[in-house]
Amino acid sequence: LPFRDEDEVIARANDTEFGLSAGVFTRDLARAHRVIARLQAGTCWINTYNITPIAMPFGGMKQSGLGRENGLAAIEHYSQLKSVYVAVNGVDSPY
C-alpha cells in the first residue's frame, strides 16, 4: 500500500482492536525497528513473515491472542511460582 510517511503507516496499522502480529519490509533496518517500536502488535517480523521458532514467544496485544505461547514466556504465563523449604535435620525456627 502506498503511504506518505511512517506516521500514516503506524496510524493505519494500529487503527484496529486487534494486534496479533505485523511485518515490515524495507532495506532500512533502522526504519524497520523504529516503526515496529510503535506498532501495537505482539509479534513483529522484519523482511519476513510468520516464521516462529519454538523458543520465540508468540502472542498478541489488544483483543488478539490468549497470552504468550512458546518459550519461557509461555511457561511463566501458565505457571504460578510456589516456594517450598524443606528442613531435613530437625526444625530450626525462632517461631
Image (cartoon, rainbow, N blue to C red):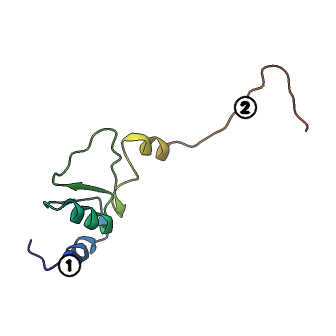
Q: Residues within 10 Å of mark 1 (few under 14, many from 20)?
A: few
Nearer to us of marks 1 and 2 is: 1
Which of the 4 image quarters holds residue 33?
Answer: bottom left
Name the residue rendered at 26%, 44% in the picture: 52
Query: Which quarter of the figure has residue 32?
Result: bottom left
Which quadrant holds residue 24? Answer: bottom left
Q: Where's the N terminus, which quadrant?
A: bottom left
Residue closer to the observer: 39 or 65: 39
Q: As rendered, which of 16 and 11 lies closer to the eye?
A: 11
Query: Residue 44 shows which numbered tag?
Result: none
**51 relative to 17 in the view: left or right:** left
| Cα distance in 3D space between marks 1 and 2 | 55 Å
Q: Position of residue 63 (x, y in %)?
A: 35, 64
Q: Is 89 drawn above or below residue 80 in the view shown?
A: above
Q: Nearer the viewer, residue 34 or 41?
A: 34
| Point 29% across, 67% down: residue | 39
Which quadrant would the C terminus be assigned to in this image? top right
Task: Name the secondary structure under disc 1.
Answer: helix
Give the amino acid type for the residue marked by disc 2 in the picture.
Tyr
Left or right: residue 52 compared with residue 73: left
User: Residue under circle 1?
Assistant: 8
Residue 78 x %, y %: 48, 44
In the image, residue 42 sits, relative to residue 85, either above or below, namely below
Residue at the image position 34 percent from the left and 55 percent from the top: 65
Residue type, label 1:
Glu
Q: Which disc number belongs to residue 85?
A: 2
Confirm or deny contact between disc 1 and disc 2 (CB under 8 A). Answer: no
Query: Of helix, strand and loop, which one carries label 2?
Result: loop
